Amino acid sequence: MHLEPPLFQAIHQRPILKLPNHARVAVWVVMNVEHFTFGKLGTAIQPHLNSHPEIANYAWRDYGNRVGIWRLLELFQELEIPVTAAVNGEICTFYPEIMTAMQEHNWEIMAHGINNSTGHSAMEKEEEWVTIQRTISLLKQSTGKHPQGWLTPGFSITESTFELLHQAGIVYTADWVNDDQPYWYPVKEQKMLAIPYTIEANDITLCLSNRFSGEQFSQAIIDQFDQLWHDGRTNARVMAIGLHPFIVGQPLRLKYLKQCLSYIKNKSQTWLTTGEEIYKLFTKDAKD
């Protein structure tokens, strides 16, 4: 199978998107809860520290699971904002306490590959199928529920990824970052919903690539939201916020995350939701 990009359709040429309660913007927060294999390089705050075995950036990432995620669980409970957690399958194996806590806080669990050190791009089709099945099985065993959505680690897809995800029962993907509205992505005479994720309103881009301060990070998220809220006056939009516990769970950034989330929550005509709820809305509209 040859992978094709999504069919082009300019946003002003589409049917009007309507959200619950006349909302202008649907905001879904995606919290990436990840396990990195020790001894392999990964997301780094100090990329020049890369000797083997590399411990500085590994430990910085590990802080997210040891400390950061617990701050974030408390914050989102305080703000009463729903969360879609993009979860590596191996979180179930190595951090069962985190799985329990996310379920207790009613976070949606979206599949996010087996771990964040294993990309899909070099996999043969059979190996990728086994990896997808293992990821889903671990999450289902932990939660009792088949995950509805999928985000591939590092966007490292293959020609077969979407076909295999559809076969495995995944109904929406967050792997496309090319729109402000969800759209149906064709998969072998079927379709799955592409719900826009983001590499702009994302703490890796803002805090690591751009080296924004906490205050600049918060303002960037607000600026993204304000423009989409303005655009949504005639045709509703969907905004993702991509977060990682080892970045926004750090003490120096938490209050700035709270600031921008509080701003969004207090804005009228805003639907704070999850990937699964967005999918339900689109399937309902398709039936209607």
Image (cartoon, rainbow, N blue to C red):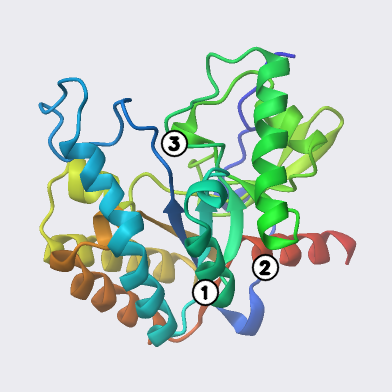
Which label sits in the foreground, 2 or 1? 1
Where's residue 73, x and y in %?
Answer: 41, 73
**Residue at 15 percent of width and 21 percent of height:** 51
Query: In terms of sequence position, does the residue under pointer 3 or pointer 2 come before the other?
Result: 3
**Is residue 243 placed above or below 159 in the rendered structure?**
below
Q: Is residue 8 left or right of residue 270?
A: right
- Measured in 3D between alpha carbons, the distance from the residue under mark 3 to the one under mark 2, in whole angstroms, is 26 Å
Q: Check disc 2 and report the residue beneath it.
A: 277
Q: Secondary structure at mark 2?
A: helix
**Residue at 58 percent of width and 44 percent of height:** 89
Residue 82: assigned label: 1
**Is residue 57 placed above or below 91 in the rendered structure?**
above
- Measured in 3D between alpha carbons, the distance from the residue under mark 2 to the one under mark 1, in whole angstroms, is 10 Å
Where's residue 202, x and y in %?
Answer: 33, 51
Characterize the local packing of mark 1: few (<14), some (14-19) or many (20 or more) Cα atoms within 10 angstroms: some
Q: Is residue 19 left or right of residue 234?
A: right
Observer-nearest of 225 and 89: 89
Q: Mark 2 touching mark 1, by CB under 8 A?
A: yes
**Label 2 is placed on what type of residue?**
Glu
Which label sits in the foreground, 1 or 3? 3
Q: Secondary structure at mark 3?
A: loop
Q: Check disc 3 and report the residue beneath it.
A: 116
Which label sits in the foreground, 3 or 2? 3
Where's residue 38, x and y in %?
Answer: 34, 32
Q: Mark 3 touching mark 2, by CB under 8 A?
A: no
Query: In terms of sequence position, does the residue under pointer 1 or pointer 3 come before the other?
Result: 1
| Number of numbered discs visible in the structure rendering | 3
- Measured in 3D between alpha carbons, the distance from the residue under mark 1 to the one under mark 3, in whole angstroms, is 23 Å
**Label 3 is placed on what type of residue?**
Asn
